Image (tube, grey):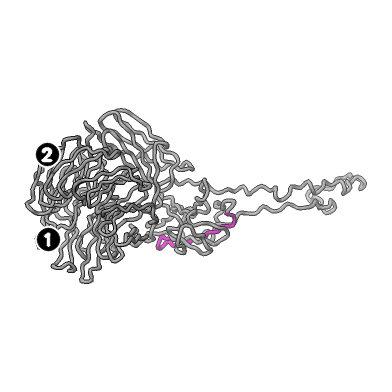
Amino acid sequence: MTQSSQESTPAADLGGAKFTFEYASDGQQLQIRFDGGATILARNLQIRSSTGKQASWAQLGSTLTGPDEQLGAGATAVLGADILNWEQSVGLRETVRLVYVGKETPSTLGRFTPPESATLTATVPEPTETPEPTATVPEPTETPEPTETPEPTETPEPTETPEPTETPEPTETPEPTETPEPTETPEPDTTPPSISAFSLSNPSGQTLRTSFDATEAVATIQVSISGEADVILTTSDFARTAGGGSYTYEATYEADSDGRFTATLDTAADASGNDGASGQSVTVSVSPSGQTAGEWPMFQFDSRNTGTSSAGTSIAAEPALEWETSFGSRNVTRPVANDSYLFVGVGTDQTDGTEGQVVAVERATGDIAWETTLEHPVGSPAAVVDGTVYIGTHKQDDGHHSPRYGTLYALDASTGAERWTYTPQGGVTAQPTVADGTVYFGTKGSDSTYLQGTGYAVSADDGSEEWENVLGWGTFSAPAVGPDLVYMEARDKNHPFFALNRADGSSNWEHTPADFKGKQTLRDGTVYITGWRDAPRVIALDAETGASQWTITPDAGVKTSPAVDADTVYYATVDGMVNAVESGTGDAVWSDSVDAGIVSSPVLVDGAVHFADQAGTLHSYDAATGDANWQYSVSDSRIAGPIAVGGRLFVSDASGGLYSITD
């Protein structure tokens, strides 16, 4: 049946807009159709559920291609469990609303609640028009006598009847333009923003950093921090970054002492006053000297490859070797760390026919806690997240263009026991990046055509495949993962760089620099990519669109992922130049040169940036000024790293050594 929704009158400037809701109870799907009547951009129309789920029409519209298009009559959006970007069924008595967000105050254009009946169609009516007032006053003689009143017994003489000329002039009737608008106004927005990833961390010293993500812009924020001293952070204390349809809010606070601090999200309200905060609370410890146990879970610390540690402290002048562990002459990968162990891959020669190993090493002593043998040599550094170590192998038969093969392993971080394996097409050459329960990684060609480099996403829980996308000749660097996109390089004849949709692996945009081979880092809505060999460069691209922001062309190639903080990008070249440039413009901040080339990615911790060169020397600089803090010779061979955890730097080398450096 058809039902008019009288409580869903469109906004005044959207008068005549009509929508039809059709619900199928057997599949618990809801289709919304725009029947025309007004001009509406897809990006200005949101669909919100009483369950807290929401999406824009452009994300769900089956007949649209972009958010800036106008809705045409017949355009539809579908909600359901198997619908991308909605992914949940529409249950009975769940209320779904159409909200227009093209104005400062959002307004509801239509609402629908599935009834008990299997199918129901609800149509939003046009606004009711106010009848125009009569232009003239009727002649008195045309006015009928009251039928319910008895005639008076004493009838006045006709001469006493007022003459028609005494009737008020019609000009006293208000003009139609003075008729007030219909009193029914659009419903105010009552859906609060969805809040996630509320966190509190101690990046260095006694600095506390709190942040959270929101599905829409937040107008009012209050975070209470309690500990040795209490403080309240409000809206003006937070910086906002936007990307991929969500917003991230971040603030820092300098504590006056060590101890335990708890942050509570008191308020996170939108412009209509809808509060998404639910008292979320998180605690962090600031230990004496500002150190925390900390972790270094992935290649460049986090899933964005920023190389900026929130879990370490810098080392003062005169660093010293704390311990060294040797694995013979076999190459050792760059380490990663949880709060107890370092994890390295040992044996990385893809053609020597040897097996590979994953080894857990005690952080405090360098003693081996466990080791697990793998079928093939290790292809890249590991990742350790939520008690699981993820690492890939890469085996190549003789010959540069011969087939390659390998396996992605998930091992128990406490024991080394195998949890699951996944066998891709090709050898695992791109370090795994773990984000929100998914492992992203890449491979190098697996067949004689040498063109099967593939990007993968698999479940972190059981290794089941979520998607794969053949990208080119091979992928060699850790993917950088954003809210909606994952960024990967892939070397084929055009050497493109890809932004893939996290949901299904499809290409969102591509950047194709000539003869480009490099790595990527994501920070604050910008992705920074590097190039080496025949195309030395550092490029900044808009993370959402791929639009170029700036390009640097150094004299020598950049073979590493840059380290990036809020203001500065740090990178090094294969001829030994170390550089800091402004993240927004690419303008130089400072630079220096060292005696050997650098092919290992830098790290930034506690105001110091560290580089490792191919001659086995560590270099430390003041991140703001470029003044040299110190340099320290670790090994006689190329070293990988460092990583910065708990007041120490850990590095490995190509001669089988793993080292702990402290002050």
Give coordinates of residue 77: x percent, y percent.
Answer: 46, 60
**What label does residue 117 carry, if any?**
none
Is residue 172 located in the magenta-colored stretch of the structure?
A: no
Tag count in the figure? 2
Q: Which residue is mark 1?
A: 375
Is residue 23 located in the magenta-colored stretch of the structure?
A: yes
Image position of 540 (left or right of 309): right
Q: Residues within 10 Å of mark 1 (few under 14, many from 20)?
A: some
The part of the chain drawn in magenta is 14-29
Q: Residues within 10 Å of mark 2 (few under 14, many from 20)?
A: some
| Mark 2 / mark 1, whichever is N-terminal | 2
Q: Classify mark 1: helix, strand or loop.
A: loop
* Marks 2, 1: nearer the viewer: 2
Query: At label 1, which amino acid type do we have?
Result: Glu
Q: Is residue 50 visible?
A: yes
Image position of 173 (left or right of 291): right
Residue at the left extreme, as displayed = 328
Where is 217 relative to 420, above or below? above
Q: Residue at x 38, y 47 (%)?
A: 585
Q: Is residue 504 visible?
A: no
Q: Residue at x 20, y 42 (%)?
A: 619
Query: At label 2, which amino acid type do we have?
Result: Glu
Give coordinates of residue 245: x percent, y percent.
Answer: 41, 52
Q: Which of 621/503 is in front?
A: 621
Q: Residue at x 33, y 53 (%)?
A: 539
Give coordinates of residue 395: x percent, y percent.
Answer: 15, 63
Measure how far apart labels 2 and 1 are at the Cα level.
33 Å
Q: Which residue is mark 2?
A: 322
Quadrant housing the C terminus: top left
Give coordinates of residue 333: x percent, y percent.
Answer: 16, 52
